[in-house]
Amino acid sequence: MPAIAIAVGCLVVFWLGYRWYSRYLAERVYALDPDFRTPAHELRDGVDFVPTNRHVLLAHHFTSVAGAAPIVGPAIAVYWGWLPALLWVVLGTVFAAGVHDFGSIVVSARNRGRNIGTLAGSVIGPRASTLFLLIIFFLVTLVNAVFAVVIAILFESHPGVVIPALVVIPIAVFIGQWAYRWRRPILVPSLLGLALLYAAIPVGQALPLHLDGLAAWAGLEVRTTWILLIFAYTWVASRLPVWLLLQPRDYINGHQLIVALALIFLGVAVGFDRIAAPAVNTDLAADAPHWFPFLFVTIACGAISGFHSLVASGTTSKQLDRETDARYVGYGGALGEGALAVAAILACTAGLGGAGEWAARYADFGAASGGGLGNFVDGVGHFLGNLGIPASLGAIFAAVVVITFAGTTMDTGVRLQRYILQEIGELAGFRGLARRLNLLTTLAVVIPLGLALAPGGEGKGFAFGRLWTLFGTTNQLTAGLALAVIGVWVARRGRNPLAALVPLVFLLAMTAWALFLNLGTFHDKGDWLLLGMDLAIFGLALWLMAEALVALGRFRRTPDGGGDE
């Protein structure tokens, strides 16, 4: 089948979803009020609560939630065949991710920008807040650990990407000063910043930055050295005001997404590449996990992801200028991520050559999980080669996209981890933590750093596939729990909560099943730390699901006041 036919069909479905389903959500489920005073105005402080142009906010929200996940997950999941992966991405984006992301922003904005974890206490029950915060703590820890490993892998395997990835930082800082200090329009400088980023790609290719000497001097592996440097950077970046680095870099990345998707889909059309992978892979290795339920946790971002609820309620809701912008930012951001996931599926099924080459790269699940990221980079390089761009340069371009998105997610993730640690500490009775930002930020960095470097069953770090699977199950579990908060909130206002409850039931079933199966896998492989985390998360999940069921059964309809719960 021609890859371009799949691309066009998916984009049409996404457009229909935004045109009709998101309007239904805005008008009938969330009942958006254009006159509602958002937390960005009510609690404006110039640091976290900042009214933001909806286009800038969409760029920030999208690049914060996207990271590498909508690329890595589909790049692994096509092992089971392109059709199951594609159906989950398209249907999940339209009917689950859009509901989840959109609703998380609205519920948080209606409650003074509070995090979805603390909202669980007032919406579901007093114990739910603590349970949810603990699950979120595990999730954000896994997000930061996994994305640090992803960036380190690309820095090590594609040293030509280091300079472009570094160049974007001072460019973003300058744009932040330009827009927020000097009050000047951001569009032109952000486009110029994007041009400078792309100009740095051939420079990086000519001057690749290797850390072999530094790693040897320190007695460390190259990947370990990169992980340490990445977390040191995130400590500094997460302490800066959002307008200085995070928002302007996100705006650059928003433009980069449009350019990347345009180039990928144009390359698919010009080359008229055909899908080489089977629609459903029937030649699976004997020890491969079954696609049901693991497909639904392997692809998280790109279909639905609980991390989005943390960003939506942790930072995005605090920057919402008008409540009606939530539809554009929340549902629109979900569609953008779905489009990126579709591009990843095409790159890994139509950009790697013929059926024989694909079968060699996806010989078993270990090869798929270990090489999925490289397959995406090579596939995009092939598509750009159809446009006359050298494949090696196209591969660096693809790696830059992954790294800049993953870096933004880590900046946001460490910032969110700081908030979560503060909330957990206050629930435990430790007051005044808000004034101890250095301590909170250090803890937010050291905890995922320890997980990223911890030895696993093989003695030299966790197998990436197993770490990714636990990240995926925790991520989808959090999404289900966020949908529970949204569903109860909607129901208590006398509206139909089925838009949230249907994906909620499906996700909780899939994630609980996957968490249970993972227990055996981690035990057999000797990954004792992951086994302990899996047990803890599984127990917390069962407890919180029981709390949510009780809340749904006892809710009483109240007038649609739209205030705090």
Image (tube, rainbow, N blue to C red):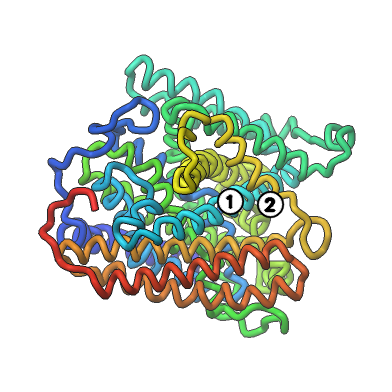
- Does label 2 or label 1 sit earlier along the sequence? 1
Q: Is residue 527 above or below residue 194?
A: below
Residue 290, visible in the rendered structure: yes
Say left or right for 198 vs 305.
right
Nearest the viewer among 171 and 513 is 513
Q: Residue furthest front?
A: 429
Label tally: 2
Label 2 amino acid?
Answer: Leu
Are the residues tagged 2 and 1 within 8 Å (C-beta)?
Answer: yes
Q: Is residue 16 above or below residue 36?
A: below
Label of residue 141 in the image: 1
Q: Residue at x 58, y 60 (%)?
A: 471
Q: Is residue 408 above or below residue 43?
A: below
Label 1 amino acid?
Answer: Thr
Residue 168, visible in the rendered structure: no
Q: Is residue 446 above or below residue 473?
A: above
Label of residue 451 in the image: 2
Give the Cα separation between the discs numbered 2 and 1.
8 Å
Say left or right for 299 vs 219.
left
Say left or right for 563 vs 523.
left
Label of residue 372 in the image: none
| Picture coordinates of residue 560, whole percent (x, y) | 12, 57
| Picture coordinates of residue 397, whole percent (x, y) | 60, 42
| Picture coordinates of residue 126, whole percent (x, y) | 35, 59
Q: Residue at x 54, y 59 (%)?
A: 344
Q: Residue at x 35, y 39 (%)?
A: 57
Q: Residue at x 50, y 39 (%)?
A: 415
Say left or right for 402 vs 210.
left
Nearest the viewer among 563 and 105 is 563
